[in-house]
Image (cartoon, helix red, strand yellow):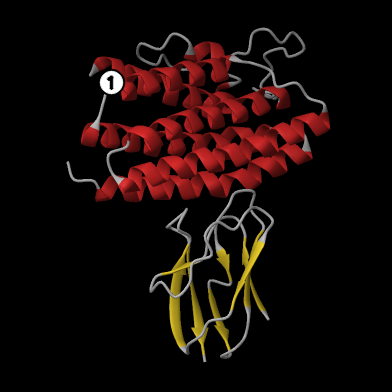
Amino acid sequence: MSPTRLTDRRVLGALAAIATAISVAGCKKTENLPADTAAPAAVAPAPDTTKPAAAASPAINDAQIAHIVVTANSIDSAAGMLAEKKGASKAVKDFGKTMVTDHGGVNKQAVALVTKLNVTPEDNDTSKQLKSGGDANLAKLQGLSGKAFDKEYVDHEVAYHQAVLDAIDKTLIPNAQNADLKALLVKVRPAVAAHLDMAKKLQSSQTT
Amino acid sequence: MHTVTIRNFAFDPAVLTVAHGDTVVWSNTDFVPHSSTARNSAWDSKEIAANATWRYVPRMVGRYEYYCALHPTMKGAIIVR
């Protein structure tokens, strides 16, 4: 139980951190998230010397946003691949397959854009936390089967897409400087919203 | 010919009225595949790739509810008169 909770919290904490990064940029520190030592680092991107901790400075730059987009997509693709293979119900398998297809489509767009803009996606604490949270989720799912797998997977998909949607609305779109990057995020948003609705529907149809 | 544009994970227009014998074209402007799948099995486009189109002529008069089999929350209807 506790590893699951911690994992979820870490993933969601990472997204929550970027979602609130702007609003807390002028403050010293965000409130301490329980058992989450990495979150404050995401709020204060230390390596960038060009940015003093001024209230108006963006919390994340375009290269970091691009990295977060690719990372968030890859994580859900990987989980979808597992669901396609291990899902008990056809609905879960189908959903997993759609996640693989759709997130693959998004990443193709993202890679095309960074190539066109000649931007190198920049790894950052949020991406790192997403990655480690995604890996932990996969590890957890690997150990489950049948209905337990379906439930864990779908529950996680609901929370994950909700967190990503919040991050897109509150942080990624408002902070994107490049018009093409912003347009990509705007174009991606309906996909995430649709996935969230689908996951919620699956969740409500599952009997526990 | 009538066009239903698939845009931002929605069918536009969501409800389209056509005359019997008219062709309906679904044009997918999203970057992921979608489908047009009739609930009564009258038609199923299968996957319509990103930036691709699919056309169909409804054979019978009536109202047809359809959805995207890949994203079942996407719904539309064709009314044939």
* Residue A156 picture location, percent across and down: 36, 32
Q: Residue at x 59, y 32 (%)?
A: A171
Relative vertical location of residue A155 with respect to residue B10 in this rendering, above or below = above
* Residue A92 picture location, percent across and down: 34, 43
Tell me the SS state at disc 1. loop
Q: Residue at x 46, y 15 (%)?
A: A132
Q: Quadrant of the rendered structure where residue B9 is?
A: bottom right
Mark 1 neighbour density, 10 Å: few (under 14) some (14–19) many (20 or more): few
Q: Residue at x 79, y 30 (%)?
A: A115
Any part of residue B13 in sight: yes
Tell which residue pokes out farthest to the left in this image. A208
Determine the chain carrying the residue at label 1. Answer: A
What residue does disc 1 label? A143
* Residue B15 picture location, percent across and down: 52, 76
Any part of residue A57 in sight: no
* Residue B17 picture location, percent across and down: 55, 84
